[in-house]
Image (cartoon, rainbow, N blue to C red):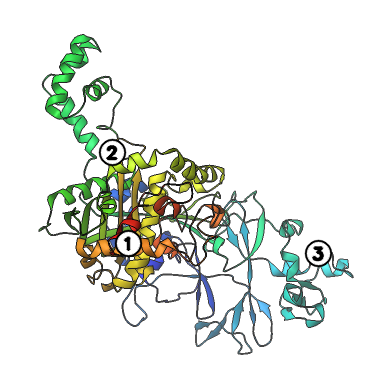
Amino acid sequence: MERILHDLRLSETITPFGVGAVVDVLGESLIAPDTSWWDRKRAPEISCDRLLARLGAGVLRQAPAHAGRAAKDTDHLLYWRFPAWRFCEQCTRLSKVTGRKNGRWINKCDCGGALVPMRYVAVCRKGSHIQDIPWFKWAHRGSDGGVTEVVRHCRAYTELKFVRSMRHGEGLAALRVHCTACKRSRPLSDLTGEDSLHRDYIRCDGTQPWEEPKPGDACDHRLIAVQRGATGNYIAERLSALDIPEERPQSAQVTERIRGHLYFDKVVADNGGPQAEMVAGWIAGEVGVTAEEVLRVAAGDDGSADTPLLDLKDGEWAAFLGKLEAGRDDGAGDFVVDGWKVPAGPKWPSSLTSHLVNIGQVRRVREVRALRGFRRHDAEADLIPADLGPDRRRMPVYPAVEVFGEGIFLRFDEERLSHWENLPKVRDRADILVDRRAASQWAHRLDSPEPRFIALHTIAHLLIRRLAFASGYASAALQERVYANSDRADRTAGILIYTAAGDAQGTLGGLVRLGATDKLLPLLLAALNDADVCSNDPVCIESDHQGSSSLNLSACHGCALVSETSCETANRLLDRQLVLGGRDVPGLLEAVLDEARRGAIV
């Protein structure tokens, strides 16, 4: 392994260039080994208990990095050269040898030409392994005419060349690995077959490029030849959490108050008898709930007080509600939110203000992102953890980065949202995506596409596109966090649009100032107006099968898609019809634009 210093933004050490990813640096192709190779003294620890509770036992550490010019003793990440096979751009010699000059490694051939990494590598179909294609072995296999036993036993390991032969046509057929000793020549087009490597008896080593082969690591899955820069070669699995004071969901707090009531033991002792119903009514009146809910807690059907949060977002939702109800936030720390009621009146369309309850100006927020591991080639392949260290007794290290930013939070009215999402036409529209998610092998990792999620998710995208014009941030610098679940005691209905970066880009103030109601409501109206007509209409608005795996309905690049790094679901589960309405589908904010245009607001 060569000590290579490379400037990389901290956020890129999580994704897209995290542990196990292939990185192109000035014509060289490198791969980052797992965190067991890190110098832990140079990798500062990051604190986020909420995130670690989800990841499991371990330590969050920031990748060794530096600011300014790199020097000999500068903090840095180690990289493994991959693929090891390269060819010289001058003499076309193909080998795994790296040149040396004055005792230092240089990426040059003995003839002085630069070494170029081979285009293809081998990836395991289900084991998430990646390795070099053994080009010498591959070049002397196959069924090309004129092959003799002498050719199959060629030992001229240094006589391979990577050449372009125009007499064989264009494309991969013209790119050939040629042995100058035995005159064996084989085109790269032989790699493209489904089981081409398997037919050539090339098997998976069961390791990553930086790992030493160990007994028992053999992998039974077949290899497939892919281009080294293919997107599917690295499917990162990351988690992120906002650094907030953890708060219990409202349902858990209510349950605790019920159980703590003086007469609760009498309800439990009567075991559902007539006295229990009478006492449950007394408790319900004092606590502010129904008698049925008291009886359900007494019967042990509600364990929300003893169970952990279902999701990282549950605690965040509870914390946001507390901030929104408190009004202006004069506190300090990494979670500062000013909460405001949405004003009602003739100035803004009532069909819009009636759906919004609160707006929060998130003046400061800290987010911690961590890499759990990665997969290759297939989203259902084995997960390779970020720490492959041999000592299983120590705590695993997860690559992490902390970023600071600002944002805007919108809370929607639960009663109106519930009424809308229970309409049969709305349910039928959302069920299209529900069925496709269920049929997909990997889409179960996405949020459940219930109507409220699709609608609020689409609104978040429309607002991001509009905020990019007004906030001073590029759209790729904005991110979303959608809180939209109805399958739990504490239903959520809100969206957070925020910017978080490891430098000053995250806290310039251009976004939070737009969270004031007199600025945000016009922006929201403008976002809806932008989405009313798409450049791809009528094809787009009438569509119900767009995007990857057809997991979008009426949404395309002309109206609703944003940068994939800004979206929680990589631009999936979107539909304009569930926001603005369609031929047979009532939209959540269907009446807003008509009312605004009648009042000449838009």
- Residue 131 placement: quadrant: bottom right
Could you tell whether 577 is left or right of 207 in the image?
left
As measured in the structure, the alpha-carbon distance from the residue carrying label 2 to the one carrying label 1 is 36 Å
Q: Earlier in the sequence, mark 2 or mark 3?
A: 3
Q: Nearer the viewer, mark 2 or mark 3?
A: 2
Within 10 angstroms of label 2, few (less than 14), some, or many (20 or more) residues? some
> Can you give x and y, in whole percent of width and height, for residue 395 in the image?
36, 50
Q: Earlier in the sequence, mark 2 or mark 1?
A: 2
Within 10 angstroms of label 1, few (less than 14), some, or many (20 or more) residues? few
As measured in the structure, the alpha-carbon distance from the residue carrying label 3 to the one carrying label 1 is 70 Å
Could you tell whether 182 is left or right of 348 in the image?
right
Q: Nearer the viewer, mark 2 or mark 1?
A: 1
> Can you give x and y, in whole percent of width and height, for residue 193 in the image?
73, 60
The residue lying toward the viewer, choosing from 97 and 590, is 590
Which residue is the site of mark 2?
Answer: 490
Which residue is the site of mark 1?
Answer: 597
Q: Is residue 63 visible to us here? A: no
Q: Quadrant of the C terminus?
A: bottom left
Give the residue type at disc 2: Asp
Q: Nearer the viewer, mark 3 or mark 1?
A: 1
Label 1: which secondary element: helix
- Of all residues shown, which one is farthest toward the bottom? 112
> Can you give x and y, in whole percent of width and height, for residue 389 in the image?
44, 55
Q: Earlier in the sequence, mark 3 or mark 1?
A: 3
Name the mark on residue 142. Answer: 3
Residue beneath the point at 64% across and 56% down: 204
Give the residue type at disc 3: Gly
Placement of 470 over or under 549, stated as above or below: below
Count how many numbered circles sit on residues in the image.
Answer: 3
Residue beneath the point at 43% across and 65% down: 563
Label 2: which secondary element: loop
